[in-house]
Each structure stands twice: as C-alpha cells, then as structure tokens.
Image: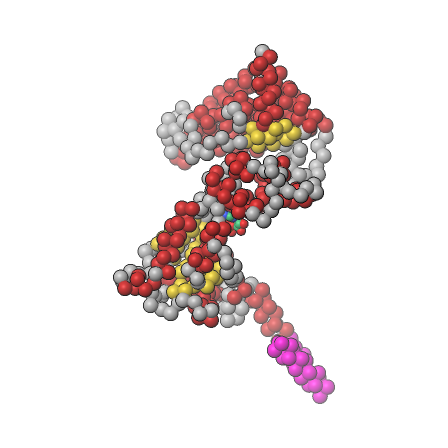
Amino acid sequence: MLKEIFAGVGLAVFVFLTLLGYNVFPVVVLMALLVTIFLLVNRNGVGLGGNAKKLEYTADADFTFDMIGGQNSAIQELQEALKFVLEREKIKVLGIRPIKGILLTGPPGTGKTLLAKAAANFTDSVFIAVSGSEFIQMYAGVGAERVRSLFKNARDKAQKGKKSSAIIFIDEIDILGGKRGTNVSHHEYDQTLNQLLVEMDGLKSDSATQILVLGATNRMEALDEALLRPGRFDRMVKVDLPDKEGRLAILKIHTRNKPLAEDADLARIAHETFGFSGAHLESLANEAAIFALREKEPAINQKHLKEAIDKVIMGEKSDRKPSPADLNRVAVHEAGHALISELLNPNSVSTVTIRPRGNALGYVRHNPEDESYLQTQKALENQIKIALAGALAEELVLGDRSTGATGDYAQTMNLVKHMIAAGMSGLGVVELEQLPQERVHEASSIILKDLEQQTRRLLEENLVLFKEIVDILADKEYITGEKLRECLAGLKAAS
Ligand code: ATP
C-alpha cells in the first residue's frame, strides 16, 4: 500500500516539475537504474536488509512421528536427542551442554524433512525450514547476512508465538557447509559457513529461546569438519532406505485416504519395491489412484498398484510406435533377459513387457526375493549373465546385436568392476584405483568372455521355451512372472 502511495506522489511531482519547465530526464534515468538494481537484488531473494523470509516455510502444526513409516530407529535416535530440548531444566541443573545441531543423513526422499517437521511438533518448537542452496549467492556477504537473519527470525518467531524453542531445518546442508576452500567462489561460501558456525557457537542453554539446528544431507563426506566438531553437529541420525516392513508401513500411510479393493495386496507390493524410498512409495500410491480413476474403478486394485510400480521406475507409457521389426527385436531381447533370470534365479521375474515406457522400449521387472546387503561372486556373475542375455539372444535369433543393449553393457561393466574391486578376478586382491587401465581391461575381458559363453549355452539349451516367450510377448506385449513359470514347468513336464 505504502509503495503505491509513494509511486503516485512521485509521478505527480514529476508531472508538476515537467509542467513548470524543469528537465527531469536525468532524474528519471537515475530512478530507473535504482529500481532495476533493487529488483535484481530482490529477484535473488536477498532483500536489502538480508531478510531471508521468502526462503522459509513453517511446518504443519499437527505433523507427528507416527505419520512417518519405516524409520523406527531413526525416530528413536532423534527422539532421544530431542529430550535435551524437552528436559531443559534437568540438563541445566546437571551442567550438560545443550545439543545445538543434529545431522540427518541418508538418500533423497527417505523422510528427513518429515523427521524435522515431526521433531518441531514433538518439542513444541517454532519450525523454520530452509535449503542450503538458497544461502549461496553471487553477492559477497549476502549468505552470511542470511544466516544471521535466519537465527534472528527463529528467535523472533518463537517469542511472538510464546514458544521456548525453535528448530531450524537446513536441507542440503552440504551446499552451505561444504569443506572450506573447495568452491570456486570460495570466499562467499566460506563466509556463509563461518557465520553458521558463529551462530551455533553463540547458542546458550540459558537463553530465552533454545535453538536447535537440524541439517540434512546425503553427502556426509562433503561436509567441513568444523561443522561436525563437538558442540556443533555432534549427533548423527541415519535415515536409510526402508526395508520390506518399512515399505509396507509407508504404503499403509499413503493409502490411508484411498479406497483399496479387496485384492490389493500391499505386502506383496512392499516385497516388489526393493530400493524404493518413501517418496517413491508416496508416488506409487498416488499413481495407482490415478490408474483407478482412469479406468473408472471405485477402488485401487492390485493391477493398478503393479502398474504404478512400473510407472514410478520407468516413467509414463510413451506414444512411440516401434516398427514391427523393432518390436520383434525388443521381444527377443527382453525374452533373453527374462529367461536367463528365471533359470538362474527361480521366481525372480515379476513382469516382462515390450510396451514402451519412459526411455525404454521394453523391460523386465524383477522380484527381489530376499533383501541382502552382501553379494556373493555367484550372485554378481548371475546378474552379469542376465544383463548380457538381451544382446546374446538378439545375436542368436536375429544374427546380430543392436544399440538397445547399451544400457545393459554399462550395468555389466559396473558389476565387473565391482567384482575386480572385491578380489573376485584373476588379479586377486587389488586396489582398483591404483590398477593401470589395461590390466582392468584384460581382467574384465576374461570374466566377460567366460560369462558370455555360459549365457549363450544356456539360451541354446532352452531355445524352445525362449521362442515360446517371444511369441507370447509379440502377441500380448506383456507376460507375467507367473505365466513365465507356467511355461517353464509345462516344458519340464513334457520333456
Ligand atoms: P531430500 O533429501 O530429497 O530432501 P527427504 O529425505 O527430506 O528428501 P522428504 O522430503 O522428507 O524426503 O520426503 C518426501 C516425501 O516422500 C514426503 O512428503 C512423503 O510424502 C514421502 N516420504 C518420504 N519418506 C517417508 C516416510 N518414511 N514415511 C512416509 N512418507 C515418506
């Protein structure tokens, strides 16, 4: 409102002076210049007073820990640390220094932001969330000023809201708190980090508002050691990808507000979504509901949930229409992957399809049987054979390979390097980084040649079944793991 009054008065003065015959042109140019600078500075969210208000948001007041699934140990660890905020008086009497910072570390989408929001609720604190990237600007000193105003803002908000504590959540803290001296424009980065350290050092247990800083990162190794020093971020809470039970808990949370059909089996979906984060699972539940809507179904059924897994992994079905020759090649390629996968790891195939989705013309989705954190040599070799089987099937049936296998080779080379690094090659125990490229290449070739030969043999021995799978795929564009296993059992019974 004030701005409009000033603009109106300014305009009136200009018109008046012009009518009196004054030359107002230089003043107009100067004003335009000043306004441009003001807008530019503000566009970067700086605000002339270094006000970081635009970057912050406040959490839902009623977000609690039981709305977060699959993170029981992270929640427990975090709650233990938060008792320091809740039991302030006891802590003061015993002379214990307050906790100033807690780091939440883990892959993206696992619920770090949710944990911070729930922590604010748990401790009845004011909650301010910002992202590390928003502090880094091209103007020297702006980041540091923002850090200062962030802490001041937290205190002011707590006082206004009559709260005794405030939680500042800094997402992507590695951007703001990366190792000093490593950034190109490191002076600005270093100043910002220094200011954060100064603010944290200044936090006292007897101040009216207790401030706790929660930082989130998935690049722990990038953090400056000064940040991790006792008295700063000296508590660490690991927020990992959820296991099967965790995934089920998250799926239940995100389907609470959605109607589920009787055949919807969330436990089965949790089983099939190894490697999914909470964010993936939330998206899966949402996509399944969209599929139900598209099919005009009153509730989400198992087919919608399964299709949603494909959607989350591979992206939306694409409108690309491959030529009949390409379709046949894709069917041969995917049948190769699927057959070898099922032969080496029975029950491992969930679905095979040659309907284009995302960037893929076709794909095989696997069922992870048991979640395992260690991989044996045999398991790695089997994975390589499955990855190579697509190209080898094309070669066997169509006489040559195609560019469709490029992604498979990248995966194969990663697995081979993994084997060499784990001492599973003819080179014995080695340090991969120290090995000359030629030796890595030689060792890889030996492993690959042998595995290629074994895979080719397996395909040749099962050619009848292989052709049956290709025919089904060419006809229906889709084959479930169950149907694949039926074919396999039928063939075994007949022979
Ligand atoms: P990033 O590191 O990318 O910032 P993050 O770990 O902070 O990710 P969140 O922002 O907390 O992840 O999660 C994103 C969304 O994913 C949430 O809004 C929620 O819908 C869902 N989600 C993630 N983890 C969980 C979980 N453990 N329980 C329930 N929902 C979850």
Q: Is residue 339 above or below residue 363?
A: above
Q: Residue furthest left?
A: 94
Task: Answer yes or no: is residue 182 visible.
Answer: no
Magenta run includes residue 400: no
How many marks can you see?
A: 0
The residue closer to the viewer here, 80 or 444, is 80
Asked whether, in this view, residue 12 is left or right of residue 190, the answer is right
Q: Position of residue 359 (x, y in %)?
A: 63, 38
Seen at 60% across and 12% down, the residue is: 494
Q: Position of residue 492 (x, y in %)?
A: 57, 15
Q: Is residue 465 above or below residue 95?
A: above
Asked which quadrant contains residue 482, the reply is: top right
Quarter of the rendering occupied by the C terminus: top right
Q: Position of residue 349 (x, y in %)?
A: 56, 28
Asked whether, in this view, residue 251 is left or right of residue 289, the answer is left
The residue closer to the viewer here, 51 or 474, is 474
Q: Is residue 366 above or below residue 190?
A: above
Quarter of the rendering occupied by the N terminus: bottom right
Q: Position of residue 221 (x, y in %)?
A: 40, 47
Q: How is the image coloured?
A: secondary structure
Asked which quadrant contains residue 31, the reply is: bottom right
Seen at 52% across and 61% down, the residue is: 57
Q: Which region of the structure is painted magenta?
A: 1-29
Magenta run includes residue 17: yes
Q: Residue furthest top?
A: 495
Seen at 65% across and 82% down, the residue is: 9
Seen at 60% across and 42% down, the residue is: 260
Magenta: main secondary structure equals: helix
Task: Answer yes or no: is residue 248 visible.
Answer: yes
